[in-house]
Amino acid sequence: MDSPKKPQDIKVAVDAVIFGYFDKKDLQILLIKRNIEPFKGVWALPGGLVLDDENLDDAVKRELQEEAGIKPDFLEQLYTFGNIGRDPRNRVVTVAYLGLVNPSYHELLAYSDADEAQWFGINNLPNLAFDHQSIIDIALKRLRSKICYQPIGFNLLNEEFPFSDLENLYKTIIGKEIDRRNFRKKIMSYGLLNETDNIKKVGSGRPGRLFTFNQKKYRELEEKGFYFEIN
Amino acid sequence: MDSPKKPQDIKVAVDAVIFGYFDKKDLQILLIKRNIEPFKGVWALPGGLVLDDENLDDAVKRELQEEAGIKPDFLEQLYTFGNIGRDPRNRVVTVAYLGLVNPSYHELLAYSDADEAQWFGINNLPNLAFDHQSIIDIALKRLRSKICYQPIGFNLLNEEFPFSDLENLYKTIIGKEIDRRNFRKKIMSYGLLNETDNIKKVGSGRPGRLFTFNQKKYRELEEKGFYFEIN
DNA sequence: TCAAAAGTGTTTTATTTACACCCATGG
DNA sequence: CCATGGGTGTAAATAAAACACTTTTGA
C-alpha cells in the first residue's frame, strides 16, 4: 500500500450477473442495452462505476435499481476482473457480482443509464460488450456448483412453489436429468420445506401441493454444522 | 460503466494471504512490517497498489517478490475488500489473494517496501494493519474448505514427502483428528501419489516412504470429471 | 377415458466409519 | 529392548443409486 511515483489511474466498477428463472425455460440473464460509448447499442451486464463514498455492495444494488429497477433476492461477490485492456477507454477493474431474482416479482424498467433492460436465455445470449461474456461464463460455473451445496435456488422460485418447479430448476441449472424420487427424498430429508395448504391450480395433470422454503430453519441448522448438499 | 459527474478517486491495491507450513507446527502466514505510514511499524499482509499497466495477478506476484522474495506455488484470487473507511488515507479497494508456499524452499527477504518479512503461526498473529485480520479470517475459511475438494495442500509440502506429513497437514488445517487408516485409504484410492524409492531418514521411529503428487495425472482425471474429495 | 403431471418404497450397491495390532529403525 | 512413528484390513453402518406403478385432475 505504498504510493508509486505517478498517481495511479485506475477506475473501479461493479457488474452484476443476475439470473432469473421462468419455469421450464432456459435460465435467464439480465442484460441492459448500452446507450453511451463505448459499445453504444450493445448488450452488457448491468453495472457501472463505484462512487467514492459507496461500498461495493451498495454500488451494485444502486446500479441494478437505476438500470433495471431490480432488487435481487440473493447477491454475492463473484470475482474481480482487472486485466489491462478489458475496457478500451482506460483501465477499469470491475468487481463482478452474482445475483438471483424471481423475475415474476420484478418488472424490468430501464432508467437513465440504459435504454433497455431485458432477460436473455443463457443459450441465446447476444454479443456482449467488454469481457462480459467471460464474466457470465464464470458466474454460470459458480452458480452450477453453488446450487449443489447451498440452498440458493429458492431465490429463483416463487415464495410458494410446487415441488416440480424445484426439480425443473435443478435440471435446468445443472443441465442433466435427475431421479425424481431420489431428489425428492433427499430434499425432504432436510426438513427445510414447509407444506402449505395450497395447491397449484394450473394446466393439465394432477395439481401439486405448494411448499415454502424455511430460511430460518436453514440458518439454525447451518449454525449447528449442517451442510445442504445435492448430488 | 458511465462516468459520474466528478472523476472517481479510488485506489486499487492487492494483498496476499500466503500460507506456509512447517511439519507439526501451526499453519503460518507471511506478514511484513510496514515501514511507512499509515500503520508504520505494524505488521500487515504483503501487498500494494496496482500499477496502471499491470494485471492484478502480476501485481500480487510483484509485491510478493519485492517485499519478501517469494514466488508462491499456488495463488488464486480470494475476495475483494472495498468498504469505505478501510484505509484511513483514502478510498482503497483491495483485491485479496490466497497463496501457498513451502517455506523451506523460500528464504524470506525484506526489500525496499518493508523492513521485515516473517512467518507467524495463525494462533500467534500480532495486531494487524487495516482490515487485514478479517482478510485472513476469510482466507482461512477458504483454505479450510478448499483443501477438502482440491488437492492444493501438496503445495505446502516438500516435493517428496512422507505420508505422515500430508496427514499432519490436514489435521493442522482442518483442526481435528483424522483416522490415519481411512485417510490413507482414501488418498491412495485416487492413485495420485507416486511412490519414490526414497525413505525419510530423520528422527526416531520407522522411516517412511516418500511420495510425490502427480499433478499431471490430476489434471487428466479432472478433465474427465473426477472430483478430489476429503471428508 | 385419456393425457399429463404428482406422488410414493424397496432393493442393490457403494461409501464411510470404526477400530488395534505388528513393523522398522535409532538410541 | 525400548521408544517412536510407519504401515496395514475387515466388518458394520450409512448413504446413494436404480427402478415403475398408482393417483389426481382437466379436457
Image (cartoon, coloured by chain):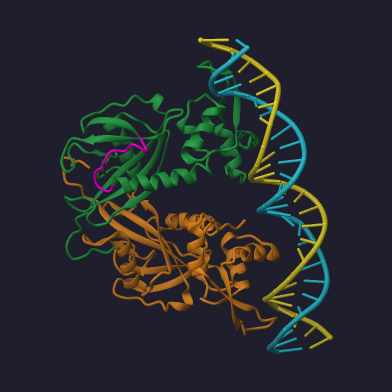
Chain colours: A orange, B green, C yellow, D cyan
User: In the rendering, at what x and y percent does residue A225 appear?
Assistant: 51, 54
Please give the name of the residue rendered at 31% of the width and 72% of the height, measured from the top-left corner: A66
**Is residue A59 in the magenta section?**
no
Q: Quadrant of residue A38?
A: bottom left
Q: From the viewer's perspective, is B115 left or right of B177?
A: left
Pinpoint residue B47: horizontal percent, then vertical percent.
Answer: 28, 40
Quadrant occupied by the C terminus of chain A? bottom right
Can residue B128 be found in the magenta stretch?
Answer: yes
User: Could you say where residue A69 lies in the image, as x and y percent from the top left?
Assistant: 36, 75
Q: Which one is in front, B120 or A124?
A: B120
Q: Which region of the structure is painted magenta?
A: B121-131
User: Does residue A111 sit above or below B45 in this rendering?
Assistant: below
Q: Nearer the viewer, residue A184 or A18?
A: A184
Residue positioned 37% across, 26% down in the render:
B106
Which secondary structure class fits the magenta region best? loop
> Residue at position x 52%, y 60% from top?
A221
